[in-house]
Image: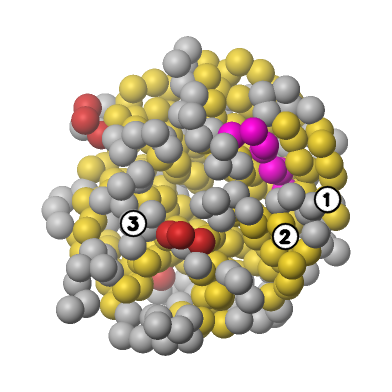
């Protein structure tokens, strides 16, 4: 099946439950659970299979401000972390129900979150451009690094040897781990870089920016393979699909662009009716979860408080 016809007949579903705008979504290791964070100061965990919500969600309360990022432990399908503007990270284990495992104070209002592939370290970025590193065994901040520029999204390489940091100056800072030694400052865009993702094999890096472009880079020589210019507005999020075949781009446009990751050619265009805040591919199926803003000047509860799921489930299309 070609990339141009792969998503023909894709299903679409809606999951509702949050009381206010949803900021973020993330799938767990198996693709069976979907987590979300909201302005209503809660996170929720949904039992999801083949794009269908199977049961009542688990509500995680404790933050005193908007939950801006949620991330699952890459080594466990049960543990997740949330960060908030309340200057804290909260750790959860769904096997314990809605009880918080630990609340860890940080130095600023947190907006970014990345979990190391070995499950031991979490990097947290805040509005003051401080990156705090949390040891999940000790359940405390073990080091803090101040950057002299705006720090946006971060990503670890699949083997955990590299931490990529996007910046407001249009660069991607490449740091070795665990030494934190800066290896390279890659000029990726002409305006701030907001979004980044790495393919599952660690060979390609996708970067999205305020200049409305998505650029694709190889991770050996850090040369640009191609750019995608189908959005006319700043790019907020880029994500590789299971296997790395597709790259989804969410922006301030009212659609999500699905591209063939090999060529950048458009494979599908998903109309959203709103700007996209966050999106995530299931690690086990070609299913995309996404959330967005309401249209300016309109009261659209669903665009703000619901999670949309779209794609081609492996077991539900026959």
Which range of residues does the magenta coloring cover? 160-166
CA gap, disc 1 to disc 3?
32 Å
Q: Are marks 2 and 3 in contact (CB under 8 Å)?
A: no
The quarter holding residue 78 reads top left
Residue at 38% of width from left, 54% of height from top? Answer: 283
The residue beneath circle 2 is: 217
Residue 71 picture location, percent across and down = 45, 41
Residue at 80% of width from left, 59% of height from top? Answer: 223
Q: Residues within 10 Å of mark 1 (few under 14, many from 20)?
A: some
CA gap, disc 2 to disc 3?
25 Å
Q: Looking at the image, can residue 40 be seen?
A: no
Q: Is residue 6 above or below residue 150?
A: below
The residue beneath circle 3 is: 284
| Image position of 186 (left or right of 303) | right
Q: Are marks 1 and 2 in contact (CB under 8 Å)?
A: yes
Residue at 58% of width from left, 69% of height from top? Answer: 261
Residue at 66% of width from left, 56% of height from top? Answer: 205
Q: Quadrant of the N terminus?
A: bottom left
Q: Looking at this view, is 47 or 316 the one in front?
A: 316
Q: Which mark is residue 186?
A: 1
């Amino acid at each position: 099946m070609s990339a141009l016809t792969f998503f023909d007949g894709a299903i679409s579903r809606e999951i509702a439950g949050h009381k206010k705008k949803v900021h973020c979504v993330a799938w767990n290791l198996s693709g069976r659970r979907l987590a979300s964070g909201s302005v209503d100061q809660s996170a929720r965990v949904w039992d999801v299979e083949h794009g269908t919500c199977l049961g009542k969600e688990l509500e995680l309360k404790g933050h005193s401000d908007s939950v801006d990022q949620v991330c699952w432990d890459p080594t466990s399908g049960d543990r997740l972390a949330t960060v908030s503007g309340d200057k804290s990270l909260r750790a959860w284990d769904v096997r314990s129900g809605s009880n918080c495992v630990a609340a860890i104070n940080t130095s600023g209002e947190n907006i970014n979150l990345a979990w190391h592939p070995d499950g031991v370290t979490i990097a947290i970025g805040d509005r003051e451009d401080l990156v705090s590193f949390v040891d999940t065994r000790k359940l405390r901040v073990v080091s803090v690094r101040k950057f002299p520029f705006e720090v946006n999204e971060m990503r670890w390489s699949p083997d955990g040897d590299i931490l990529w940091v996007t910046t407001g100056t249009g660069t991607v800072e490449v740091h070795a781990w665990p030494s934190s030694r800066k290896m390279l400052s890659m000029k990726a865009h002409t305006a701030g870089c907001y979004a980044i993702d790495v393919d599952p094999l660690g060979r390609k890096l996708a970067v999205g920016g305020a200049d409305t472009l998505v650029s694709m880079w190889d991770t050996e020589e850090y040369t640009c393979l191609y750019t995608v210019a189908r959005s006319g507005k700043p790019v907020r999020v880029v994500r590789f699909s299971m296997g790395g075949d597709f790259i989804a781009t969410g922006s301030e446009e009212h659609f999500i662009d699905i591209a063939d990751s090999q060529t950048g050619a458009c494979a599908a265009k998903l109309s959203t009716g709103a700007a996209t805040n966050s999106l995530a591919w299931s690690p086990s199926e070609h299913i995309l979860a996404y959330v967005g803003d309401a249209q300016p000047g309109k009261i659209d509860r669903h665009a703000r408080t619901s999670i949309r799921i779209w794609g081609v489930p492996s077991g539900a299309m026959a």
